[in-house]
Image: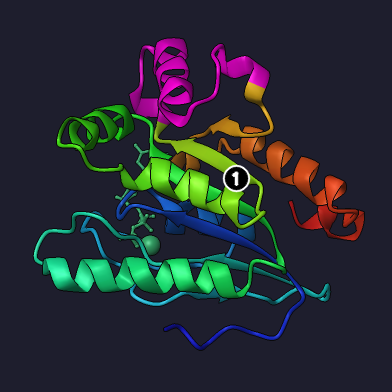
Amino acid sequence: MFDSRPDRSAEVVLVGRSNVGKSTLMRELTGHTVSTGSKPGVTRSPNHYDWVAEDFVLTDLPGFGFMEGVPEERREAIKTDVVRYVENYAESILAGVVVVDGKSAIDIIDRHSERGEIPHDVELFHFLRDVGIPPVVAVNKMDKVDDRDDRLDALCDRLGLVPPWQQWDETIAPISAKRGQITPLTDAVRHHLHEAKRDDLLGFF
Ligand SMILES: Nc1nc2c(ncn2[C@@H]2O[C@H](COP(=O)(O)OP(=O)(O)OP(=O)(O)O)[C@@H](O)[C@H]2O)c(=O)[nH]1
Ligand SMILES: [Mg+2]
């Protein structure tokens, strides 16, 4: 279990499979250097960003799912830790950002479904809702996607959201963290902070 969490009463978490760009997004949101890399599994323990005066922490959680060179057992253990973390702090977590790779997410989801498994991204999305945390899906690496609307509609379909994706702008946020194009995500998070009556935190996003 991760035990480095600062004592703050409001939190936004970034979760998702390995190598989807969580740390790159974290860096973009905070302007603070975070380790990123082309090799999956770069982040092994949470990166907490709590250098703000507000009673708030932004957390980049380790990625899970397939990681080259990381044994299955270890991958499962990371996932269990992430799920426990979210459960433990659900009261404080005002939005759960599920980061996915817009280029590969649908194929990976469908591959898992065909094998009769619940895909990680779909599971995470429903898990967040179940524990009362509004999920925001940050569909990252959109700079590599050419059939944008089709992709985003397909993703909605897999998540049980009726397309078109444009009607889910509080939940589906197409971004390119690497290019600094993240406004759909910050707008969605701001919406949830407002709903949670935490306008005092809007300045952070
Ligand atoms: N094309 C493109 N590449 C991106 C984008 N965002 C991140 N990447 C790349 O994706 C790779 C993984 O990025 P990270 O931010 O380390 O991913 P992560 O989700 O933190 O990975 P773990 O810590 O292993 O879970 C890096 O090579 C990034 O440069 C994006 O918007 N577009
Ligand atoms: Mg990372």
Q: Is residue 168 left or right of residue 37?
A: right
Q: Is residue 2 left or right of residue 50?
A: left
The residue at the point 56 percent across, 52 percent down is 128
The residue at the point 14 percent across, 66 percent down is 72
The residue at the point 34 percent across, 48 percent down is 120
Q: Residues within 10 Å of mark 1 (few under 14, many from 20)?
A: many
Decide if ligand 1 comes within 8 Å of the CB at mark 1. Answer: no
What color scheme is it? Answer: rainbow
Q: Residue 52 lies in what quarter of the image?
A: bottom right
Count how many numbered circles sit on residues in the image: 1
Reply above or below: 54 against 205: below
The residue at the point 66 percent across, 17 percent down is 167
Reply above or below: 18 against 146: below
Residue placed under numbered mark 1 in the picture: 135
> Percent from the top left, x then y, of residue 152?
46, 20
User: In this rendering, does residue 70 appear at all?
Assistant: no
- Most frequent secondary structure within the magenta stretch: helix
Residue stretch rendered in magenta on the structure? 142-167
SS state under label 1: strand
Q: Quadrant of the N terminus?
A: bottom left
User: In this rendering, does residue 59 appear at all?
Assistant: yes
Q: Is residue 126 left or right of residue 50?
A: left
> Percent from the top left, x then y, of residue 12?
65, 60
> Percent from the top left, x then y, of residue 38?
24, 54
> Percent from the top left, x then y, of residue 63?
35, 60
> The residue under label 1 is which amino acid type?
Pro
Q: Is residue 181 left or right of residue 61?
A: right
Residue 140 is covered by the magenta coloring? no
Residue 145 is covered by the magenta coloring? yes
Reply above or below: 167 against 47: above
